[in-house]
Image: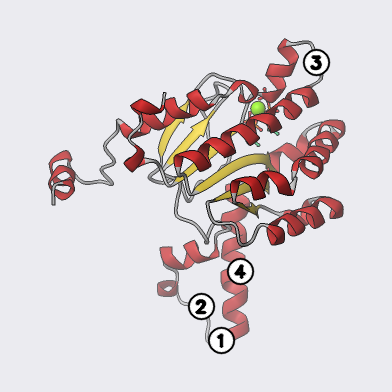
Amino acid sequence: MVEELDMTRIPRHIAIIMDGNGRWATERNKPRSYGHQAGVETVRRITSECVRLGVKYLTLYTFSTENWNRPTDEIAALMGLVLTSLEDEIFMKNNVRFRVIGDRERLPEEVQEKLRETEQHTEKNAAMTMVVALSYSARWEITQAMKEIVTEHQQENTVPLRPEMITEELLDRHMQTNFMPDPDLLIRTGGELRISNYLLWQIAYSELYFCDTYWPDFSEHDLQKAITSFQSRQRRFGKTEKQVEENENK
Ligand code: IPE
Ligand code: IPE
Ligand code: MG
């Protein structure tokens, strides 16, 4: 029910851990890949809904570094789905820009090519940016950021890197997510109460929302419920309730 939502306080960036596809399929006596297929449909619905609500960034955890440890046939099915589901039409219709974060070099060449293509085709779309985390893990991301910092410094300088050169801003600039603000709201579907190596650096002050619904069943209404919960909270960023209220009334 959109009536409950304060349209002036829609989170700018929503990150989602789309979990529960496998269990959804198993409950229906179907192979896990059937659940992933159904999950793609949810991605389409939720993307359109986010655009409609005015969300600016939607970051979807699609395949984690740890997911490389799944059975090879499930990995193949997931890679196949990435290839077939990236249709330009969905992005063009919604004016959505597509971006990828993660260790893309580990992905099959064919998938890498499709990702590059989709990123290029949608480059000028401006209603919302949909970011897909593929072969992504936060510890990998933080580690590669540190490697980049050292490598770049060595290429450009003869003096060694000094501790005071390491700042939060510098790390931010070397994160995969350096083109967007941190998530305001993190949603995990599927009932597990954990982060599973997702955006650890960026969610330092995100509001967390967990629900039991399996991702294929996650509806526009469920998304609105998550946003309503977000809007009912006071983000204090370390300050007191009173300080935040005084600031809001200015
Ligand atoms: C999330 O669903 C999608 C991926 C991790 C690729 P799962 O496949 O983890 O589904 P469950 O958690 O086993 O139900
Ligand atoms: C997290 O889901 C990763 C994605 C949704 C892509 P998992 O199902 O892999 O998480 P764990 O392993 O149960 O924590
Ligand atoms: Mg899971």
The residue located at (43%, 25%) in the rendering is 225
The reply, left or right, for residue 76 in relation to residue 167 is right
Q: How far apart, in angstroms, are the residues tagged by discs 4 and 3?
A: 44 Å
Location of mark 2 (residue):
161
Location of mark 3 (residue):
30
Q: Quadrant of ligand 3?
A: top right
The reply, left or right, for residue 34 in relation to residue 204 is right
Q: How far apart, in angstroms, are the residues tagged by discs 2 and 1?
A: 9 Å
Circles 2 and 4, Cβ within 8 Å, touching? The answer is no
Q: Position of residue 203 (x, y in %)?
A: 45, 45
Tag 4 secondary structure: helix
**Earlier residue among tags 1 and 3:** 3
Tag 2 secondary structure: loop
Circles 4 and 3, Cβ within 8 Å, touching? The answer is no
The residue located at (36%, 33%) in the rendering is 230
Vertical placement of 196 versus 89: above or below? above
**Circle number at residue 148:** 4
Tag 1 secondary structure: loop
Circles 2 and 1, Cβ within 8 Å, touching? The answer is yes
**Earlier residue among tags 2 and 3:** 3
Q: How far apart, in angstroms, are the residues tagged by discs 2 and 3?
A: 55 Å
Single out the mark in the foreground, 2 or 4: 4
Tag 3 secondary structure: loop
Closer to the camera in the image, 157 or 239: 239
**Circle number at residue 157:** 1
Single out the mark in the foreground, 2 or 3: 3
Closer to the camera in the image, 63 or 70: 63
**Earlier residue among tags 2 and 4:** 4
Residue type of the residue flagged with mark 2: Leu
Q: Residues within 10 Å of mark 1 (few under 14, many from 20)?
A: few
